Image (tube, rainbow, N blue to C red):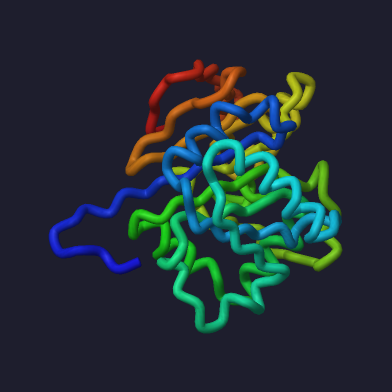
Amino acid sequence: MASSQGRVPRVRIILAGGGEASDSVPLDEQFARWTAPGPVLYWPFASDTSPEACLRWFESTYGRLGVIDTVMWRSLDEMEGVDLGAFSSVYIGGGNTFLLLDSVRRANAAERLTEYAGDRGVIYGGSAGAILLGRDIGTARRMDANEVGLLDTAGLDMALGHAIWCHYQPTERPLIQEWSRETGHPVLALSERTGIVREADHLGVVGIDPVLRIEGEQTRELQVGELFTS
């Protein structure tokens, strides 16, 4: 997606906490406004659900919002020779976060995604996809088995230095504080009913529930509609 001369790149990223369709309506509507009618590139391969079932879910969820042109990849082997700029958005679905990061690294896809985002491409990360786009995927250890044996868990760092914690429950706050202390990374804790939208160099809370920003012992509750950078 080549930039025209003089145009300022605008990063547009959606990070969803991983809920059901009824939980993520505000985020899905934002995604549709940015991307419809498409074409959208859908990555479901971190999931253990069949690709066919994933595609049916995607089309039923987003078709009613006007997203009507979807290309699904079964693996990142299909990236070779493809210009991501041909797509209005890339949708990275949930599943095993370690498998997802391993796939991205094996395909040397991180740099291409970063370039795509910087050239006005839209990226939606749901659950594992959101965690991947954060600073470090170590936040997924409580949910996902690291069967691929990753030692370096650095993510793609598209959330202004924050790691992402999805499917957040209030009882998990001490776990997040401990992880943040150990790593030195600030964390955005997303329930299944909320998410973060990044546009350019600011973040905003979109959804139903507030988002917690946790850095060591410090916790800040960010309300729906609130904008912040750090």
* Residue in the image at 74% along x and 65% along y: 150
Residue 186 drawn at (x, y percent) = 54, 37
Q: Is residue 64 left or right of residue 100?
A: left
Q: Quadrant of the C terminus?
A: top left
Q: Quadrant of the N terminus?
A: bottom left
Residue 107 drawn at (x, y percent) = 61, 76
* Residue in the image at 74% along x and 19% along y: 170
How many circles with numbers are drawn on the protein?
Answer: 0
In this view, 42 is above or below 177? below
State the residue lying farthest toward the bottom.
81
Residue 49 drawn at (x, y percent) = 85, 54
In this view, 4 is above or below 145? below
* Residue in the image at 55% along x and 56% along y: 69
The residue lying toward the viewer, choosing from 57 and 202, is 57
Q: Is residue 229 left or right of residue 75?
A: left
Residue 50 drawn at (x, y percent) = 84, 59
Indicate the quadrant where residue 185 lies. top right
Residue 137 in sight in this render: no
Q: Is residue 36 left or right of residue 100?
A: left
Q: Is residue 62 left or right of residue 22?
A: left
In this view, 151 is above or below 212? below
State the residue lying farthest toward the left.
6
* Residue in the image at 60% along x and 37% along y: 64
The residue lying toward the viewer, choosing from 211 and 28, is 28
Residue 172 in sight in this render: yes
